[in-house]
Amino acid sequence: MKIGVFAKTFSGNDPRTVLTKAAKAGYQSVAYNMVCSGLDSMPSEIPRNVVQEIKAAVVEVGVEIASISATYNMIHRSAQVRKKGLNGLKTLAKLAVQLDSRLLTLCTGTRCQTNQWQWHKDNNTDEAWSDLLAEMREAILIAEKYDVYLGIEPELANVVNSAQKAKRLIDELQTDRIRVILDPANLFDVVSIEEQHQILDDALTLLSPHIAQVHAKDRSFDGSFATVGNGVLDYGHYLNLLELHKYKGDIVAHGFSESEASDVYKFLDARITCL
């Protein structure tokens, strides 16, 4: 299991700088975001020299691109916002082929119009689900055209806010283009340790055949997010579950500052080594 990190954890607007910092902190892979190349996260176009810079940095530094961020609000009420998102997704799908890193990570969206990671009471409506299905079908056409995969992440603030909803989406769309990004800290906020274990047990049992990447983040006792290892997430239980379900992909850490990156790597490495 390779330990990765969100590339945008590190300052810098060129891939060599960012990947070098990731490598020095210990990481073997990154979830790449185009802001690390000085572009928008969802660019309408990517200059050829930018693609070459990423390729060269990967070879020179030896840090792999585990996935590419392609997040936008998939159920935004504005057709223009959704169209821009799909255009960006197409651009990043082309990049994924060039980089041979074919997992694009999505945001299943929220009815909140100003923040795609903010909960809205209408997220659980039939209308929101129907809009997500329609948008996902458009995204799947892009994925099929460019032979890439779409990673959806169960996230409390979004439409797909549980493992059960992730499985429902996969079942209803009937496609092999959807993969799951599993972040255990996004499956609960304030729960007992027994409840936490049950939530994680159920999620891995239900979704393990579809998981392409897992994340490492943490929660505080009050439900707010915390730096990996400084919260209530039972990493021993989590990592043992991944081992039980024979997960062999990357575990990608995020949600902390650049100065904390090395300590987070050491925390994860020590526990993975003991598996």
Image (cartoon, rainbow, N blue to C red):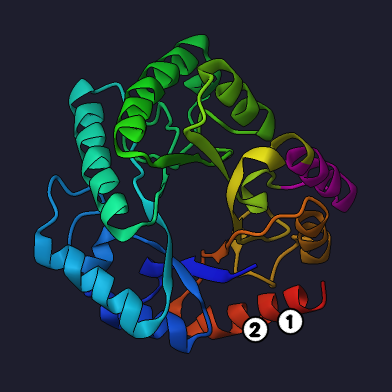
**In terms of image quadrants, where is residue 53?**
bottom left
Label 1: which secondary element: helix
Q: Nearer the viewer, residue 191 or 175?
A: 175
Image: 176 above or below 222: above
Is residue 62 positioned above or below 209 on the image? below
Left or right placement of residue 113 versus residue 2 in this view: left
Does the rendering let one see residue 83? yes
Prevailing SS of the magenta stretch: helix
Mark 1 is surrounded, within 10 Å at the Cα level, by few (under 14), some (14 to 19) or many (20 or more) other residues, namely: few
Residue 170 magenta-highlighted? no
Q: Quadrant of the N terminus?
A: bottom right
Image spot of residue 102 (x, y percent): 40, 49
- Which residue is identified by label 1? 270
- The residue at 54%/39% (across/down) is 179
Q: What stretch is highlighted in magenta?
A: 190-204
Q: Are marks 2 and 1 in contact (CB under 8 Å)?
A: yes
Is residue 74 shown to the viewer in this render?
no
Location of mark 2 (residue): 266
Instruction: Tell me which amino acid carries mark 2.
Output: Lys
Image point (25%, 36%), residue name: 85
CA–CA distance in space, label 2 to label 1: 6 Å
Residue at 20% from the left image edge and 35% from the top image edge: 87
The quarter in which the C terminus is drawn is bottom right
Which kind of residue does numbered mark 1 sit on? Ala
103 with respect to 215 (left or right): left
